[in-house]
């Protein structure tokens, strides 16, 4: 287990042990062998997945990678480490263990036993939820496929690939649900998940942020911090679902997702540390010339990724979100820990709206604003990381601080979509926006300058000059461990 | 319009007066391209592109946002204007591509919050008008050589897909996520109200079991399946989408009969004067008698002889009498229907020189091949159809100085009853010429109803000999006796009885249940064969209007009212 004094340990596994059958072609803990029909269907899908991985997975040729593979969903099983060739990674199907007494915790079915089969009434909605979630998983792999060629270290390269294979496994998790519970239509949707591709003008991914290019490693870290965190929160709501197989699937996925958060948090932190170091050393913010990324540019990257990730929560007011909740399909974050009636009929909350150039509050039915409820939880969580990064600045004796921009900044979805809001939360007109947006969002020039720093460092234990090394390696291995063995052609 | 104005609330509160809607703004159907908020029209030679980009904040009344290209009546009023102007102002346009300004969303259909907050009458009127506009799009394709092509660059849901269904071809982008769907039944507990169910089976010939699946599957179908089932004609990837649309638009244009070298005429702003309870257009006047809940509409014959030829008609443009009359009637019908819901009976008169009317009638027949005359003929046809589906009792009053002849006689035949004065009003003008009506060739096919029959053939359904007998008298001045004998009028009375009888008839009418009258009249007006249009206005609309008013849709726990609250409808599970 890697422990980092500055950022805390990587998340530790918890829960009882349940064995995964690795003798099967498709590793699983759902007794796939007993369901011939489902097994056949998934075995039919597997080669298509592998084709996709080969075509759109990581482009850097590798021999093997020091990867964590789940061999059981319990405490000791889900974090098994070994060097494996990536295309032989055992993508499989793992669900958290079943609680036979589990009851639906919210909505109009509150108190009824959790569903073990899809209720016909909610088939379309559940399928849609799973498809949208499933669509994001392979998307990020596609977005990040070329990053390997500019990795700042083998340590980071390994983390990238770990994230990638786990996103691939998350796709498996969703495909399993589609195959197991949604019949022929589910299988067709599973195929579509591989046919849509990130940024493909003919057949783009469903959500906008997943069609944005990941241009460099700073953006990758921001992505894993902010955008994967959206995924964590979405999974958190699906983990509450009355549809038990979905809940159990997402519960297990959340454990893996925690690692992605770790990569993002520490990744940005290490960039900030290096930046702080260079700023101190040269007593200037302009550290391009010394091979570092200036703090204002980091802030711009943060502004961008945070705002497009906020869009992923959808409109603040959403009929679908309310319906999903009332129907018991998708709960709130930490639903069972909340102290209310879990039905929310008649409950209200306030939200911001823009009126006459000012941001004002109005009261709306809580049921209609559940996307906002979830987003607020997310924002609070995002702030933790920023605090941590600022600690690094403070430790370096610097005055400058990073901050989360206002929720209305650079938004394309929801109440702010038709307005321009500065990072400080001031509604500004078109002219001001045009004049200032270069100060707030990464310009092409910024991205070019960052890209210019992105030179690969494949020597074990060595790190590119724009990022600090971590204090500990993965799984108690040293930082200079040979986490990735590149293929000959990658080194040529 | 206030939410509580809808039907369901009032019925629950026994004895309490139903909540009154706040004074609803008067809706005007007169728009001009420079005032469009929701559409953009680009004309490029023989192809026009009509682009839907709904202004979210441009709702006709407060209370909802028009997100995701969802529409309300205001959006449709602009669309109607576009359809009309393309026909009259752009003879060179031979195909019309309808598409969306949004990425990955063609149109989400009628705005549900708007529907949920609207009164029953508003919903019904809204659906009727949108249906008429969809029919108008089909009429442009079949009667004007202006082929409409739906270029679905994103999802077309509900009314959005119904817009596409009104087009001759549906091309759906193949991007792995855009779909066509009719989610009304599963999501809202109502029907697709603008012909969706009918057109899927009747026009696109989708098998009924597949139609059943389609209309209960809220997310609909994407490209390949949509094409396989006949819900769309083609599916094309994004990369080749624009070229394919352009290719099809030009292919359709090549088959058109419209002239390439003609100039359009301008549909100039209507010369309409409203003061108090009277509305005046150059050839049409209307006065409203609120106490009797009566509108008296008079159409005036032309004063001048018809222009000499097609070119001269063209020069008159929107002032050409048949076109001016049609535009005025169209506007008046829409106004009275929408803004004067309590005015339950319309009296229609025609006044002036029947020979002058017949001269124009003959010209419309003689020059039917002229593109502009063709447009005018079909416009008048559509306007008469609008009258046919109007939920008002219509009574034609035929008195001396009447000119119910040829095309104007259709107005009398569209009425539920026809009263003719036998002789003259002795006290008013003893020397007047007694009223006569005149049949022309045009009454036997130029203005078909939605059932495909002429109004004469509908009137004498099952009595072909009566049609033949009437036809034999084409061109004659038919006085009260002759008209009665031929069955062309309801009652002929002399001046001793006429006024009293008419008063009693109207008072009696005004006392009957308006709902029952609407249903009764609609049943009597449409005899004989069913067509897609009669099914849409009869079957689909009637069922929809019933569903709209049922608690399962519009009750406090109904699906439509609950939409947007985050809760689904609770249904009374009894099948009726």
Image (cartoon, rainbow, N blue to C red):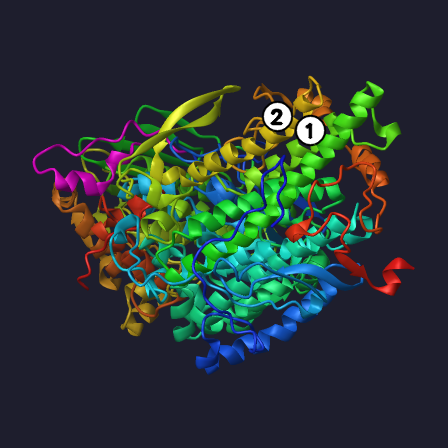
Res A29 visible? yes
Near-viewer residue (A203 or A93): A93
Q: Is residue A342 left or right of residue B176?
A: left
Q: Nearer the viewer, residue A213 or A264?
A: A264
State the residue at coordinates (36%, 42%). B564
Residue A164 % position (x, y)? 66, 56
Whether B484 is drawn above or below B398: the answer is below
Q: Can residue B135 be seen here?
A: no
Report, in whole angstroms, how far the alpha carbon at label 1 lies from the one at label 2.
7 Å
Point out residue A430 in the picture as x, y percentages from the top left corner: 65, 24
Q: Are marks 1 and 2 in contact (CB under 8 Å)?
A: yes
Q: Quadrant of residue A333?
A: top left
The residue positioned 55% from the left and 78% from the top of the image is A24
When asked about the image quadrant of residue B457, the answer is bottom left
**Which residue is nearer to you in this view: B151 or A415?**
A415
**Can residue A443 be found in the magenta stretch?**
no
> Residue under mark 1: which chain is it in?
A
Q: Residues within 10 Å of mark 2 (few under 14, many from 20)?
A: some
> Which segment did they paint magenta?
B1-27
- The residue indicated by pointer 1 is A299
Neighbourhood count class around disc 1 (C-alpha, 10 Å): few under 14, some 14–19, many 20 upward? some
Residue B276 % position (x, y): 31, 23
Q: Chain of mark 2?
A: A
- Of residues B29 and B150, the one drawn nearer to the viewer in this rendering: B150
User: Is the magenta region chiefly helix, strand or loop?
Assistant: loop
Q: Quadrant of the C terminus of chain B?
A: bottom left
Residue under label 2: A403
């Amino acid at each position: 287990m890697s422990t980092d004094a500055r950022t805390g340990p990587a998340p530790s596994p918890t829960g009882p042990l349940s064995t995964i059958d690795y003798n099967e072609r498709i590793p699983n803990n759902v007794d796939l062998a007993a369901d011939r029909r489902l097994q056949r269907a998934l075995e039919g899908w597997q080669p298509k997945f592998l084709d996709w991985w080969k075509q759109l997975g990581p482009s850097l040729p590798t021999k093997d990678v020091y990867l964590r593979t789940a061999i059981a969903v319990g405490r000791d099983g889900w974090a098994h480490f070994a060097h494996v060739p990536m295309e032989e990674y055992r993508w499989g199907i793992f669900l958290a263990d079943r609680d036979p007494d589990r009851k639906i915790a919210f909505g109009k079915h509150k108190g009824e036993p959790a569903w073990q089969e899809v209720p016909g009434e909610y088939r379309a909605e559940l399928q849609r939820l799973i498809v949208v979630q499933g669509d994001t998983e392979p998307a990020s792999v596609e977005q990040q496929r070329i990053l390997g060629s500019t990795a700042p270290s083998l340590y980071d390269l390994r983390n990238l690939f770990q994230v990638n294979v786990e996103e691939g496994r998350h796709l498996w998790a969703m495909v399993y649900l589609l195959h197991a519970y949604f019949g022929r239509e589910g299988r067709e949707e599973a195929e579509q998940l591989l046919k849509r591709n990130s940024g493909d003008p003919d057949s783009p991914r469903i959500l906008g942020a997943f069609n944005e290019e990941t241009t460099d490693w700073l953006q990758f870290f921001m992505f894993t911090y902010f955008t994967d965190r959206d995924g964590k929160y979405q999974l958190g709501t699906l983990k509450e679902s009355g549809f038990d197989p979905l809940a159990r699937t997402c519960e297990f996925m959340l454990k893996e997702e925690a690692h992605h958060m770790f990569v993002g948090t520490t990744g940005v932190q290490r960039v900030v540390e290096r930046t702080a170091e260079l700023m101190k050393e040269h007593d200037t913010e302009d550290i391009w010339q010394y091979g570092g990324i200036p703090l204002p540019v980091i802030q711009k990257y943060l502004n961008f990724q945070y705002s497009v990730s906020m869009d992923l929560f959808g409109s603040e007011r959403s009929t679908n979100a309310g319906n999903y909740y009332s129907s018991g399909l998708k709960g709130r974050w930490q639903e069972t820990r909340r102290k209310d009636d879990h039905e929310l009929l008649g409950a209200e909350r306030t939200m911001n709206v823009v009126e006459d150039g000012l941001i004002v509050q109005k009261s709306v039915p809580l049921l209609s604003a559940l996307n906002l409820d979830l987003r607020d939880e997310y924002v609070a969580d995002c702030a933790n990381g920023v605090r941590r990064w600022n600690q690094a600045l403070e430790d370096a004796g610097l005055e400058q601080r990073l901050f989360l921009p206002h929720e209305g900044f650079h938004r394309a979805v929801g109440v702010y979509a038709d307005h321009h809001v500065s990072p400080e939360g001031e509604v500004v007109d078109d002219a001001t926006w045009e004049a200032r947006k270069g100060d707030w969002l990464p310009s092409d020039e910024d991205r070019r300058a960052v890209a210019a720093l992105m030179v690969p460092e494949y020597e074990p234990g060595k790190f590119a000059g724009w990022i600090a090394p971590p204090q500990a390696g993965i799984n108690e291995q040293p930082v200079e461990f040979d986490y990735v063995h590149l293929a000959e052609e990658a080194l040529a | 319009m206030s939410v509580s104005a809808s039907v369901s609330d009032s019925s629950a509160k026994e004895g309490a007066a139903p909540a009154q809607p706040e004074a609803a703004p008067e809706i005007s159907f007169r728009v001009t391209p420079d005032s469009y908020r929701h559409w953009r029209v680009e004309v490029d030679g023989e192809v026009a592109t009509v682009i839907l980009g709904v202004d979210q904040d441009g709702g006709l009344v407060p209370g909802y946002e028009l997100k995701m290209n969802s529409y309300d009546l205001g959006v449709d009023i602009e669309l109607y204007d576009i359809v009309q102007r393309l026909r009259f102002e752009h003879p060179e346009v031979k195909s019309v591509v309808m598409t969306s300004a949004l990425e990955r969303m063609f149109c989400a259909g009628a705005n549900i919050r708007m529907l949920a907050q609207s009164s029953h009458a508003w919903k019904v009127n809204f659906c009727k008008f949108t249906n008429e506009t969809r029919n108008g799009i089909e009429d442009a394709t079949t009667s004007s050589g202006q082929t409409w092509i739906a270029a679905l660059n994103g999802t077309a849901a509900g009314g959005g897909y119904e817009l596409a269904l009104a087009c001759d071809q549906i091309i759906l982008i193949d991007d792995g996520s855009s779909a066509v769907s009719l989610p009304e039944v599963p999501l809202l507990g109502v029907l697709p109200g603008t012909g969706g169910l009918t057109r899927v089976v009747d026009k696109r010939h989708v098998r009924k079991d597949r139609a059943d699946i389609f209309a209960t599957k809220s997310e609909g179908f994407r490209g390949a399946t949509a094409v396989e089932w006949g819900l769309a004609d083609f599916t094309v990837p994004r990369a080749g989408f624009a070229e394919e649309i352009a290719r099809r638009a030009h292919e359709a244009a090549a088959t058109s009969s419209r002239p390439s070298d003609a100039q359009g005429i301008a549909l100039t702003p209507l010369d309409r004067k409203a003061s108090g309870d009277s509305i005046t257009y150059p050839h049409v006047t209307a006065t409203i008698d609120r106490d009797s809940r009566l509108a008296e509409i008079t159409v005036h014959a032309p004063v001048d002889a018809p222009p000499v030829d097609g070119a001269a008609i063209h020069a008159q443009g929107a002032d050409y009498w048949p076109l001016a009359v049609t535009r005025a009637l169209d506007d008046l019908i829409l106004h009275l229907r929408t803004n004067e819901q309590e005015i339950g009976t319309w009296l229609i008169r025609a006044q002036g020189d029947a020979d002058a009317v017949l001269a124009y009638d003959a010209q419309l027949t003689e020059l039917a091949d002229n593109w502009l005359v063709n447009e005018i003929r079909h416009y008048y046809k559509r306007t008469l159809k609008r009258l046919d589906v109007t939920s008002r009792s219509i009574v034609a009053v035929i008195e001396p100085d009447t000119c119910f002849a040829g095309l104007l006689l259709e107005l009398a035949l569209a009425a539920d009853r026809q009263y003719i004065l036998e002789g003259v009003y002795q006290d008013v003008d003893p020397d007047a010429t007694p009223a006569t009506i005149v049949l022309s060739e045009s009454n036997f096919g130029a203005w078909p109803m939605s059932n495909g029959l002429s109004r004469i053939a509908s009137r004498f359904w099952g009595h072909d000999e009566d049609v033949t007998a009437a036809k034999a008298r084409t061109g004659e001045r038919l006085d009260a006796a002759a008209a009665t004998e031929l069955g062309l009028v309801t009652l002929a009375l002399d001046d001793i009885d006429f006024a009293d009888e008419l008063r009693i008839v109207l008072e009696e009418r005004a006392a009957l249940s308006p709902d029952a009258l609407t249903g009764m009249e609609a049943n009597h007006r449409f005899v004989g064969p069913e067509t897609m249009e009669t099914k849409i206005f009869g079957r689909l609309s009637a069922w929809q209007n019933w569903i709209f008013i049922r608690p399962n849709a519009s009750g406090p726990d109904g699906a439509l009212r609950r939409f947007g609250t985050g809760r689904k409808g609770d249904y009374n599970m009894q099948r009726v």
